[in-house]
Image: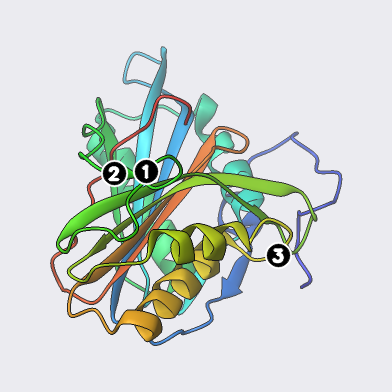
Amino acid sequence: MTTKVLGKNISYSSPRGLKILDKIERNQSGVKYGVDIWNIYDFLFRDKNNLPKLKVLEISIPSTSKYIVESKSMKLYLNDFYNMSFNKDSLLATRIKKDLEKIIKSDIKVRFINNFYQEPSHLVINSTTLVKSKSDSLLKFNGFRSICPVTSQPDFANIYIYSDKQLSINWLRKYLMSYQDQGDFHEQCIEAIYKDIYNEYKCAHLEVCGRFQRRGGIDINPIRGNKNKILFKNFREFNQ
């Protein structure tokens, strides 16, 4: 994969706008429903009085978008707003939305948030003694590890799985641990997990959410499922 910014020294001398954004064509996996929720924790801009404001920005990109944005280029694009003034936060969110939609070729949602949802109730499969999960239950695997296919550096996450079927706890643990030395992007990991669980159990209702650790002030949290209404909200864990 050839990129504009990943692995390169970048000048920070002047605003670069859309030209710095690096789009990557998304591998269409056939998973019907899903969204990628990006949380930008260190988003700095100026208010109408030209004073700095540091806020959390949430960007939601549908899993059916033609393109995704390489995360370092997204960070560089968003960093350029630190010395720009806006009369209203909503005007800034609208500008970012329009810019990204030109690159991604899909409708997205952009908003500022002041808090996160609470982590949903779940069963931790790392420590449970159950052989099988209960149907219509939410499971959590703590300590998921995968390898970035570009940098070869590890990514860490906790994986949440809702299923209307009973799942083998031992099978699920071994399967999720098999990613520890395997390389893929966040989005593709979650899509593969969803598809492999579905193929194994043929769940009528299945949803998989990956809450990945942040890199450079940004975390990316893909959700994939087979129902139009997404169960998982933008919640946050202690160590995210």
Image height of 24 relative to 176, above or below:
below
Amino acid of disc 3: Gly
* Secondary structure category for the residue under label 1: loop
Q: Is residue 114 left or right of residue 187?
A: left
Q: CA distance from mark 2 to mark 3?
A: 27 Å
Mark 3 — residue?
Answer: 183
How packed mark 1 is, by other alpha carbons closer than 10 Å (few <14, some 14-19, many 20 or more), is: few
Local packing at callout 2 (Cα closer than 10 Å; few below 14, some 14-19, many 20+) is some
- In the rendering, at what x and y percent does residue 196 appear? 45, 78
Mark 1 residue type: Thr
- Which residue corresponds to the image point at 14% horizontal and 61% vertical from the top-left? 136
Figure quadrant of residue 75: top right
Q: Nearer the viewer, residue 110 or 31?
A: 31
Viewer-nearest residue: 202 or 99: 202
Tell me the mark number nearer the camera, choosing from 2 and 3.
Answer: 2
User: Does residue 201 appear left or right of residue 121 in this picture?
Assistant: right
**Residue at left offset 70%, top offset 64%:** 182
- Within 10 Å of disc 3 (Cα), the crowding (few <14, some 14-19, many 20+) is many
x, y percentage for residue 27?
Answer: 53, 81
Looking at the image, is mark 1 or mark 2 earlier in the sequence? Answer: 2
User: Which residue is denoted by mark 1 in the rendering?
Assistant: 128
Residue 50 vs residue 175: left or right?
Answer: left
Disc number for residue 123: 2
